[in-house]
Each structure stands twice: as structure tokens, then as C-alpha cells.
Image (cartoon, rainbow, N blue to C red):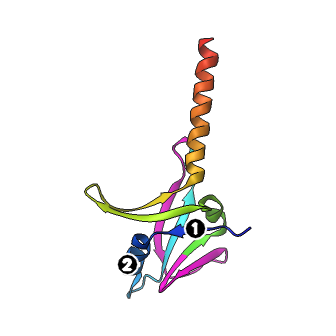
Amino acid sequence: MEKKLNFTDQALNQINLITKGGEKKYFRITVQGGGCSGFQYDFSFDKNRNEDDLIFKYHNTEILIDEMSLTFLDGSTLDFIDDLSGSFFQVNNPINRMEKYIAYYFLLYNNFLLTN
């Protein structure tokens, strides 16, 4: 089954704007472990591809994601937020939400065991 990562128009427009011209050829997304707080995402720019990178092409925008990170991003959507709180990329990840529900369940279960 093919893994999928979705991008909003706002995210693609911002990536395209940043990578246009200059030395910033690729936009790179990497997932790092996060424990109970969920995944940590690293957004960077790169001139080179690594051997395990997959390229997502949208119009003139090329996005690099290594195979391991894509496993954790499957089904996610990358968005770009620009509001009063600031301007930033945001990943809406269904896997991350599930981890929080599981952590919450174990917290409730442990509290139940301690009080009974």
C-alpha cells in the first residue's frame, strides 16, 4: 500500500515561495521521536537528496521525506498557518492523535488501579 502525505494549498504556496531561486532546492520534512508529547517535526531546506529520500512533486515544488519519516507521516496533512499567533508549518497527523488517546487511556487506567 502506498503511503500518502497531503499538503494544503497554503503549505505548497509557502514552500514554493521560500524555495524559489537561491540555493534552497528542496524542502525537507523529518520526523523525530517525541514520546508522550507526540512526534517532533523538523522542517529544513537542502540542496542534496539522500539515498533513502522520496520526492513529492507538486507543480514546481519538490519536497523530500526519508522513508522512515514517511511511515510516521502516512495520512497526515501539512498546513501553513499565518495568523495572530505567528506563521508556521503544522502537521495534522492522525497517528499522533491516536498516541495521545492511548496515553490518556493508560493514565486513567493507572489512576483507577491506584485508587481501588
Is residue 46 covered in magenta?
yes
Q: Which residue is mark 1?
A: 5
Q: Which residues are magenta?
A: 36-63
Q: Percent position (x, y) of residue 103? A: 59, 36
Tell me which amino acid carries mark 1. Leu
What secondary structure is marked by label 1? strand
Instruction: Tell me where residue 5 sits by quadrant.
Output: bottom right
Side of 7 where 84 appears, left or right: left
State whether residue 98 appears in this view: yes
Q: Is residue 3 above or below residue 22?
A: above
Q: Percent position (x, y) of residue 6? A: 54, 68
Q: Which residue is mark 2?
A: 18
State whether residue 33 appears in this view: no
| Frontmost residue, 12 versus 43 | 12
Is residue 42 covered in magenta?
yes
Question: Tag 1: Cα neighbours inside 10 Å, few (<14), some, or many (≥20)?
Answer: some
